Image: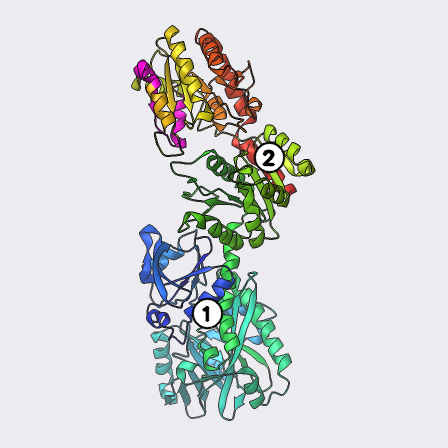
Amino acid sequence: MANTVGVLISRHIFPSCLRGRSPYESFALYSLYAKQEGLRVIFFTIDHLLMPRFLVQGYEQKDDGSFVQRTVPIPRVIHNRIKPSAPLPEFKQLKNIPEITLFNRDNRLDKWKVYQALVSDRVLHPYLPETCLLNGKSFEEMKDRYPALYLKPRDKSLGMGVRRLDFTDSAIEVAHAMGQRESIAPGQQNGWLQKCIRREPMLIQQSIDLIKQGQQPIDFRVAVQRGRNGEWKISGIVARVGPAGGIATNVAVGGRARQLMPTLENAGITKPEPLIKEIGRIVLRAADCLQKTYPGLADLGFDIAVDQTDRVWIIEVNGRDLRITFRQAQDWEAWRRTFATPMEYAGYLLKKQMNPHPDKPTVAIVTPGNLPVSSNGSGSVEISAREIAKRVSKHHQVYLVGKEITPMGKVHVVEAKPPSRGGYLNQVAGKLRLLDPDIIQVENRPLWIERFKRVAPRTKKVLFLHSETFLQPPYAKPKQIKRTLPQYDLILTNSKFMQHRLTRQFPKMAPKIKSVWLGVDLNHFASIHDKAVREQRLINRKHHGLHGCPVILFVGRIIPKKGVHHLIDAFLRVHSEYSNAILIIVGSSYYGKNIETPYVRNLKEKSKPLGTHIRWWPFTSHHQLPSIYQMADILVTPSICKEAFGLVNVEGMATGLPILTTKTGGISEVVVDGVNGRLLPVEGLTDGIVRVLSEWLRQPQRLKQMGIESRRRAEALFGWERVAEDLSRIYQAL
């Protein structure tokens, strides 16, 4: 929902808006201009909100012009187009959600508060007719200064309740906006005035002798809105021509909207450009001024008067321009701008909302999309991306793109839900076009660069390689890799081993290739050498019948290249000497799916003679793994392939376990032979495992010392905070 903007519409006109028949709003124009800004727009009323669940049952316009109702999270940016006359509980709740920007939320402006804000500005002061709160004293004082005055309700618009007072020797002649007239004799004036004051709070204002078209008064409506850069801009100016002899020009009281230039010409203004420029200057300053009093304003309608001497006046400011004047005047360009500008501003707010570190590059981390990021089934790539995003978000605005991502602190989650497996890349590309990050980091999918270059040509592209798998057939042909890798601005590997292999293969790219070791959550994977963990470890071991038994652990995928068959064969021999030893194998043949392949069935059949001394535990979600590590005494990872890094090893190290592993790939960068574990050659691996396990099980004190060294090394080199700091420096330099 990162690109979604809401438009909150009055329930009274919503049905006609859906049918395209409202003179006030155009859903089609909102949708058109939202699309141009890369936004998705959802239309709704207060009645469509499901506040306890933070959902809205809004309407979205499809490409064919029809509408479909969808239940979606309440958009984080909403253009408010309602102006409730009475408090609405749901509206109040909506305004109080801190994560939601409801722009133009407080649009019922108090005319007196507006006047006070504007009159305090030395530049604007001369453009304001004298205005006071209506009471007996202000009435008498202003009556003595002006031959005519206006009475206006503090909290009404559309000309409702407006009266013009003309003072004669014999009476006060009162003209109402709707055309009624009355004459107040001297003896009735005090009672009449008190009645006005009691009815509702009123303002009393100096009357302006407006320019006219014949006998018809003219004023101007100026739509001032905040746009793409958050700055105020004028979307349109339209003339309003009141009825002959009328006191107001509002359409609601009989006025008619007319195009600006012909009306000025009819009023005898031969040089309109300086006048229009002056109007533009003062309304933009006034909008800036009011923004300080009413934070969140974004859509203002100024009523501007020009008197018989061509002097400009600010008569009134409305917090929600109804736009119907532009439609009635057939000023279609301005009419369209009044819908385009709020969508520009919505896009600006979304970008601003997403970037709390404007001085540092924004980073979009794109996961492969074949596995979930947060739920069961995450692989090491998704785990790494998730943990990196959480830490890097302390220094940068981070978008984490993928499937099945739960909210995580400051990270801006961008969840892709393609209708088909092949649609993931298309959807991600569209989201990247919208997000427009400074850096796109592609996790382990080198060929995606060409698609991302098309949607974000100026964005820096980083490839984070976790293995060589996707550099080779069947995932990529050599020609494709040779063509795509140089297009990246930077290539990161998770080990020096991978860095050196790439550099040998692509020597010209050496300056672009850097290594950054992955990490582990040192708090989550707490050490068994800490007192609190030891106590819980004892409880868990008793619960699983492990008390007093040396426990050997394997965690990972049960596939041939992970070497589990070597471990099973070795343990069958070790068990003959250490009959109380227990081997726990945690994992499955595929991420998150406990599929029993022929390889798995063969291993389980082979392990049957030892009964419960070899235990098969199914795939376990990553957040549940620490308690399993903490029940073990030794972690064995007998990989026979060239592992680029081996995240399981650093998790075991953080837990305080000695590591028995192989001298392949980047593993030797993590485990130091003879210090916190042993590195065995792949040749003769089964015999090597037997030899080391037999040796270690005789020396529990040595096991403990190696485990302590594992934790020390993990703290020094493999915390995710260190990874985040390294990456932040790299991003900044890029």
Relative to 374, residue 427 above or below: below
**Could you say which disc has been placed on residue 461 in the image?**
none
**Could you say which disc has been placed on residue 29 in the image?**
1
Q: Position of residue 297 (x, y in %)?
A: 48, 63
Q: Position of residue 614 (x, y in %)?
A: 34, 17
Q: Nearer the viewer, residue 660 or 24?
A: 660
Residue 306 figure quarter = bottom right
Q: Nearer the viewer, residue 556 or 682?
A: 682
Q: Secondary structure at mark 2?
A: helix
How many numbered callouts?
2
Q: Quadrant of the C terminus?
A: top right
Q: In 3D space, how far apart are the residues under numbered discs 2 and 1 (Cα atoms)? A: 46 Å
Label 2 sits on residue:
726
User: Is residue 617 in the magenta section?
Assistant: yes
Relative to 346, residue 161 above or below: below
Residue at 41% x, 89% y is 173
Residue 233 figure quarter = bottom right
Q: Nearer the viewer, residue 712 or 433?
A: 433
Q: Is residue 604 left or right of residue 512?
A: left
User: Is residue 216 in the magenta section?
Assistant: no
Query: Main structural element of the magenta stretch: helix, strand or loop?
Result: helix
Q: Amino acid at mark 1?
A: Leu
Around disc 2, counting alpha carbons within 10 Å, would you say few (fewer than 14), some (14 to 19), or many (20 or more)?
some
Residue 617 in sight in this render: yes
Q: Amino acid at mark 2?
A: Asp
Query: Between disc 2 and disc 1, whose residue precedes?
Result: 1
Magenta stretch: give its range: 606-630
Q: Is residue 210 left or right of residue 371?
A: right
Relative to 646, residue 55 above or below: below
Q: Position of residue 535 (x, y in %)?
A: 37, 18
